[in-house]
Amino acid sequence: MTQQTVLLRDGTSLPLVGLGTYGLRGDAGAREVAAALSEGYRLLDTAAQYGNEAAVGEGIRRSGLPREQVLVTTKVAGGDQGRGATTRGVQESLRRLALDYVDILLIHWPNPSRGLFVETWLEMLRLREEGLVRSVGTSNFRPEQLALLHAESGEWPQLNQIQLSPVLPRSEAVAFHREHGIVTQAWGPLGGREGLPGQIPLEKVARRHGVTPSQVALRWSIEQNIVVIPKSSSAERRKQNLDLWSFSLSDADRSDLAALALGEEHAWDSRSHEEW
Ligand SMILES: NC(=O)c1ccc[n+]([C@@H]2O[C@H](COP(=O)([O-])OP(=O)(O)OC[C@H]3O[C@@H](n4cnc5c(N)ncnc54)[C@H](OP(=O)(O)O)[C@@H]3O)[C@@H](O)[C@H]2O)c1
């Protein structure tokens, strides 16, 4: 299945659909990751915090794909922020993944109460020079937090991964990213384990196109060049999530989906929400 891609500013080409791996752990997790790669996924999203980097690395090896055909994203955990700790955290991630480099390294959450995210960012830029990391970015950063990184380093993150779906369109953040050449990546593009509220408009649009509500939600993101990383432990649902290229949304569809949008205050707020 041919996938469309977006380009990071550094020239890295990212498929618009990757695989989220939160909850895919151990041998079963490795099996699901290997299966997803055989089904056509080429972008994997993990994190030190998920406790599954070893399973993701094992899945890549079981798939038999050459390393350079798979893009691996991992994230610096809250407790690994700061000078020295960031490098040690990344070295540990690489050991668990059993890889020589990660393709994309993100700061998982800014955790502003510690005041370490700028130091962490500067250390990530050094790790990139050393070749342990190919592209650097952030997750859950607000525009003013991104601007601080730029002010202190002269460089914007390549990508910011944020909570985003038709229910949480995050329009201001997306516009800010676009203005500064930052690719937006959506976590929870299907609303996570609870799913997306608003099944009625999603089902209405899905019926028009003969697809599923999940496919409509994912298509809504990728049509804005937003990279989605839906997680699924089911081969059938993973296939659905990758099969988004046979239909496109009309103005009427988009206006039906706009009825789902909740305000920014419903998204996790990284000024106060911190994760370790
Ligand atoms: N940066 C961050 O702070 C952050 C936070 C949260 C998540 N993430 C990343 O983003 C990824 C995706 O987010 P998420 O896992 O929270 O949620 P999600 O991908 O929005 O939703 C996953 C849920 O949807 C179900 N599902 C998947 N495909 C489906 C389909 N076609 N039809 C119906 N149900 C479907 C899955 O169940 P089945 O597995 O049974 O199919 C699972 O319960 C994570 O795995 C993780 O890699 C990052």
Image: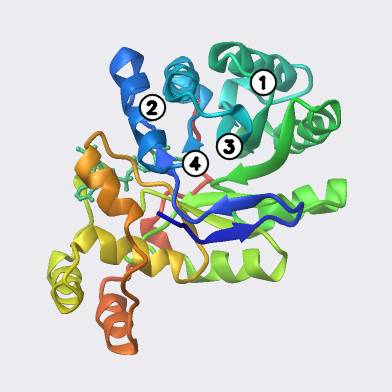
Q: Residue at x 49, y 41 (%)?
A: 42
Q: Secondary structure at mark 2?
A: helix
Closer to the observer: label 1 or label 2? 2
Q: Earlier in the sequence, mark 2 or mark 3?
A: 2
Q: Which residue is mark 2?
A: 34
Residue 161 position (above or below residue 235): below
The picture quadrant for ligand 1 comes to top left
Residue 128 vertical position relative to residue 197 in the rendered view, above or below:
above
Q: State how far apart marks 1 and 2 are (Cα).
A: 23 Å
Q: State which tag comes first along the sequence, 4 or 3.
A: 4
Q: Quadrant of the N terminus?
A: bottom left
Where residue 185 sits: x, y (%)? 51, 53
Label 3 element class: helix
Specify the color scheme.
rainbow
Disc 3 to disc 1, how far (Cα)? 21 Å
Residue matched to label 1:
90
- N-terminal label among 3 and 1: 3
- Quarter holding residue 83: top right
State yes or no: Cβ of the residue under disc 4 lies below 8 Å from any atom of ligand 1.
no
Q: Amino acid at mark 1?
A: Val
Of the image marks 1 and 2, the number of the one nearer the N terminus = 2
Question: Can residue 187 be seen?
Answer: yes
* Residue underneath mark 3: 69
Q: CA distance from mark 2 to mark 3?
A: 13 Å
Q: Which residue is label 4 attached to?
A: 42
